[in-house]
Image (tube, rainbow, N blue to C red):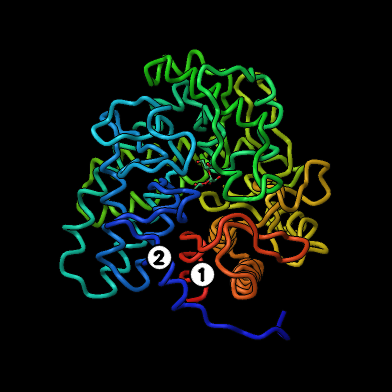
Amino acid sequence: MSDDIKLDRHDDARAILARNDRGGYTVPTDRLYPFQWNWDSAFVAMGFATFDIDRAYRELERLIEGQWEDGMIPHIVFHAPSDTYFPGADVWGTRHRIPTSGITQPPVFGMALRFIHDAAVAAGRQDALERTRPLFAAALRSHRWWMKARDPERRGLVAILHPWESGSDNSPAWDEALARVPTTTTTQIRRKDTGHVDAAMRPRDVDYQRFIHLVDTYRDCGWNPEKQWASAPFKVADVQMTGILARATADLIRLAAVLGAQDEVAELSEMHRLLTEGLGRRWRDSLRRFVSLDLVSGEDIEAPTQAGFIPLVAVTLDGQQRAAVAAEIARWCDGMVVSLPSTAPFSPAFEPKRYWRGPVWAVINWLMADGLRANAMNELAGSLERGTVWAIEQAGFCEYFDPTTGEGLGGNTFSWTAAAYLVLSR
Ligand code: 9WN
């Protein structure tokens, strides 16, 4: 790695964010994803915070324009029409004043808010508290929604009702649970993604049939959370989602303290206790990682995906667990040009070019490095960060990378890859 030419791409990264700016919010990339996506925007906001605090706050402010009355922050906010993406606003049929999708995505929002607040304070911004306060209120409402709507049985684990919610759409983690979902749809499927990107790097048609079957089902529930919970044919208590929620909750506790919101500190601390205890019960010694729970079958989901390590952002491992995680990650990285593959290369499900079934994602490495560092595994964290920066410098700001070759894949000029570069190469 050290023999390659080192390229400084900070200016390029900022230029990508500027180019994908649509007026205070950032699209993930032009055409392929022409709206505001929830967790993309949270990562992007942190990227902005490295050089433009106002714009960082603005990204989150625009995202919560889509927040529902019940507190959910939708996974897509359709601020302006575009016909280059399927499924568009008409398919979702939701009733918010700005059209949105009807499902959510990982709540990186709380993490981003703390990151931006700290950056604002470090920059000596007098208006930091004033800017942070309403966003904190929105984040708190969304965390309450998560606990109520997605952990009604109080397991200390939040569930996804659609693979798109996980952000890891066609991960092998969902294969068994998704196989139970019928392929019939009332909505006509008109994929646009495969017109922008090679179909071999995208989810398959049968995945889309099931994705849209789920959208049809929940739209028929009028997007009511209780009805959806009762009729969901796909329901997974996801350790990646829960890990991010728990970590964001810890970040909100810190912000609540700074804002002098004592009742909220207590409320969030209870939430945090529930979630970290829930995660603790999902650790498996034999697999050397955490496992999600299929709430329809009651079975552990053992497919080896990156999700198994994400709880490190929220939980403190003991010495034995740390050694186990280090050994398991080394096994996944063995022989790879770029790590961490999103599916273990020794798994039969591994496909190095197909979306969430193998490729490396910069924002996943960002979370991984964060979690490893929080667990005092600094060397491994540094190596994942350097590997990510190197991959971007060699291949560009691609959506994801082939771990076996380092080739850049999917969409180009990707906002969250640019944000990851800005943050990880600081
Ligand atoms: C569906 C925008 C999003 C990311 C997801 C990624 C992909 C959408 C799609 O793109 O999902 O939400 O149409 O494939 O899987 O993580 O937020 O970049």
Asked which quadrant contains residue 326, the reply is bottom right
Q: Earlier in the sequence, mark 2 or mark 1?
A: 2
Which quarter of the rendering shows the N terminus?
bottom right
Q: Secondary structure at mark 2?
A: helix
Give the residue displayed 61% in from the left and 68% down from the top: 388
Q: Is residue 306 above or below residue 207?
A: below
Taking the image as shown, residue 180 lies to the left or right of residue 150, namely right
Residue 152 placement (x, y as % from top left): 44, 22
Q: Is residue 134 above or below residue 1?
A: above
Amino acid type assigned to the residue bearing label 1 in the image: Tyr
Taking the image as shown, residue 59 lies to the left or right of residue 293, namely left
Cβ at disc 2 under 8 Å from ligand 1: no
Residue 137 placement (x, y as % from top left): 24, 44
Q: Which residue is mark 2?
A: 17
Give the residue displayed 51% in from the left and 69% down from the top: 421
Identify the mark at residue 421; answer none if there is no mark: 1
Give the residue displayed 23% in from the left and 40% down from the top: 263
Q: Is residue 312 above or below residue 160?
A: below
